[in-house]
Image (cartoon, coloured by chain):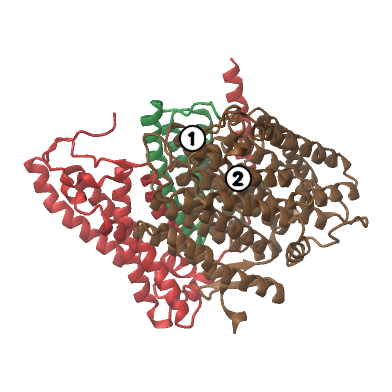
Chain colours: A green, B brown, C red
Amino acid sequence: MNISLLYSLVGLALFSLGLYGLIAYGHLLRKILAVNVMGSGAFLILVALARGWRQTSPDPVPHAMGLTGLVVAVSATALALALACRVQETTGSTQLTEDGSD
Amino acid sequence: MVALIPWSVWIIFLPLLTGIFAFLFRGRGAQLGIVTAVGLLPPLIGLTWQVLSCGPQHYSVGGWGAPLGIDLYADGLSIIMLVMTALVGIGTTFYATGYYSPTGETKEKNHQQDPALFWSLWLLLWAALNCLFLSADVFNLYVALEFLGLSAVALVALAGGPSAVAAAMRYLLVSLLGSLSYLLGVALLYFAHGTLSLGLLAESVTSSPASFAATTLMTAGLVMKTALFPLHFWLPPAHANAPAPVSAVLSALVVKASFYLLLRLWFQVFTNTVTPSVALLLGILGVAAIFWGSVQALMAQRLKLLVAYSTVAQLGYIFLVFPLAQGKGTGFSAWCGGLYFILSHACAKAAAFLAAGTVLYGFGHDRIDELAGITQRLPVTMFAFGVAGVSLIGLPPSGGFIGKWLLLNAALAGGQWWWAIVIIIGGLLAAAYVFRFFSRAFSYVEQVPICRDVPWSMELTALALGLSAMALGIIATQPLAVMQIGAPLAGPVLTGGLP
Amino acid sequence: MRLFSAKLIIIVLLVALAGLIAWAILSLPFNGPSLRAQVFANIGHSGVSNPVTAVLLNFRGYDTLLEIVVLFLAVLGAWSLGMVQLPGPPYPAGLFLSALLRILLPAMVLTAGYLLWAGAHAPGGAFQAGAVLGGAGILLLLTEVRFASAIVSWPLRTLLSAGVLVFTGVALGSMFLGGRLLEYPRHWAGILILVIETAATLSIGVILTVLFIGGRPSEADRTLSVKSTGKRKDK
């Protein structure tokens, strides 16, 4: 099997696992980690497919997209962690309660 | 010479710079906000003039040009969104000068909101909106979406308190999920077509598996960010718990940004991959949103929550554009109706949220049952809420009426009368939840609740925005002329010779 | 039982979505269209020789500008949650740790400088360098409070926004020199990219350090001494 195809499918698996984790788990830290797993999956797909099928040097544009996405993910994760700490401080819970949602 | 000035660059960079300056020079936020509100007018007028006289405008950042570089693009749709942002933005800015004035400290317990951070975040959010409405590159749009999402989340968190922080947390997770889904769609589009430019993608996207998957991922992500039923669960807590000016901006503008992108993608890029059945599905979810949002608004105990659920309902209408545009010869009518609805909802909803914020500010709470007779204390604010309510219900001569009228026209002339029934029932439901609050507020009581002094800028801006929603119903020709420029659909505005 | 079936529905939907995307990936064109050739054709004019840096800082520099704004926004977001006390060191730095830091920190700063410089022709660049600086900053925060408490006011705010300001300045400046937004004057591209990256590195390092605190450092913490044996605020 082609190596870049293999890695892109691994990326897809990570993306789906992260998506499952984000929906299925309640603990905020788990949710934040799940979003990061999703993001890593997406970036892996970008980097893997950038190599193409048999090109000697990879396409730099998806690499740049991955790097930009990575920085955005770092920023969002930092804000999410700060928020999660504050949620625990103010509500005493590490999960979001359902009230006020529906 | 004037025709060559890159106005779009200034529309993006003026709020970006003032936002950073508001962070650097604490205490100068209000002045910088007013500088931005006033300073954005010349570039906006300039760009509108360029688009009106020369058609859609392109600008290549870095001089490379698509597909290697990133292009800015402005057509009628962009102008409508930019003008809407400016209208609400200017109003919110003046409201906030009162709301965050040194005398008017906010009543949140155990937490003082930092005005410097508010100004910085708000101006950056304004920049993010302008970035998004002017970008013609799908990956750049991803960055703009995250830019917008992060600033919106931070503004919700600014209110402090357990419910606001929890709402911000939920909002952030939903926002990230939506953007990541969108990003994966962008990746698939790039690997299939070798370009990120909207214009070039529009030429090359055919119905292949990659474009189908990209359509699914990007639509799902953006629908989630637009809070379409049943993915709306994050919206009411976030919009109801944010500080008043922030609620107005979130409800009037931020949810529209992701919808704008959805419109661009569906009508310009994915024309070959979207099927009538998917459009129908979005329409049905829109109907569910209208009913669910209205019923929740009818049952809401708090005024800001009522207004927030009203947003859920009103967002349902704009999703009717997708099935209505499929009608024969009525596509342009539906397009204009949707845009008109977005425009007037922005003004009316901003007015309603600002008025609700003034009530909360004046009385210290917004429990509807305890607000009897408040019109005696805040007549201007309640009048503003009333004018906004007229547009939300869709009564003439408001902008909301024109929007609904065009949608109704598209439904009836296109032979899809069942949507017309929904639009009419939705209007009645809106009347019910608006009057439920009015019957309290306008009732006469002996002992009127105590209200503290409210800065005049807060009362007047809500009124001005409410009146602009009204004015949109009177000057319909000009906005409709702008909507035509570069529109993906052609045809008459009204079909069947109705006035 | 009900919970189980809800999870089952989620799994079924996710598998369907993953299947759709897998089908899309497998059907992508063999050696499909890409911008690779265009990047390599124009790299001579970009001012750098590393293709990824050329895309990030020149061809798609506007994305990178917005990306640094997003990073800056994360700080504003964390600060909007209110003041926090600086996380004091869990225990005072011992002799060994202090000695190690004296070697490690200069080495980290040097590494950051190298990564920044290498970005022009090899993998590296502002974010990588900034991340190393950020690591150094966090190490300092964990061992020595005085470092951070000395700069909580306007110098810190200037450092945080320097990256965005310099990038925006260059972007708009090139417009005033007759080009378009971010269209560097021909022979200056390399230098200007280095200037932007230097400012960005500095800002990214400080931003990552500040994000580690998780909130706005309270200015009252200036008076904290190193000896305060860390009453960490998390409970």
Residue B300 picture location, percent across and down: 62, 29
Chain where mark 1 sits: B
**Residue type marked 2:** Thr
The x, y position of residue B400, in whole percent, is 74, 49
* Mark seen at residue C176: none
Q: Residues within 10 Å of mark 1 (few under 14, many from 20)?
A: some
Image quadrant where one finds the C terminus of chain B: bottom right
Q: Is residue B412 left or right of residue B487?
A: right
Q: What amino acid is at disc 1?
A: Gly
Q: Are marks 1 and 2 on the same chain?
A: yes
> In the displayed structure, would residue C47 be above or below residue A102?
below
Along the line of sight, the residue nearer the viewer: A45 or B449: B449
Q: Quadrant of residue B301?
A: top right
Residue C33 visible in the picture = yes
The reply to whether dot 1 and dot 2 touch (C-beta < 8 Å) is no
Tell which circle, 1 or 2, labels the residue nearer the N-terminal end: 1
In the orientation shown, which residue stands out farthest toward the left? Answer: C95
Q: Quadrant of the N terminus of chain B?
A: bottom right
Q: Position of residue B343 (x, y in %)?
A: 68, 54
Mark 2 Cα shell of 10 Å, populated few (<14), some (14-19), many (≥20): many
Say if B352 sits above or below C38 in the image: above
Q: Secondary structure at mark 1?
A: loop
> Which residue is painted at 21% across and 61% down in the image?
C110
Q: Which residue is mark 1?
A: B364
User: What mark, if any, has residue B381 been given in the picture?
Assistant: 2
Q: Is residue A8 above or below residue B480?
A: above
Cα separation, mark 1 vs mark 2, equals: 15 Å
Who's the residue at 51% across and 37% down the image? B451
Q: Looking at this view, name the residue that lies furthest to the right.
A: B497
- Under circle 2, the secondary element is helix
> Left or right: where does residue B139 sit relative to residue B77?
left
Q: Is residue A14 visible?
A: no
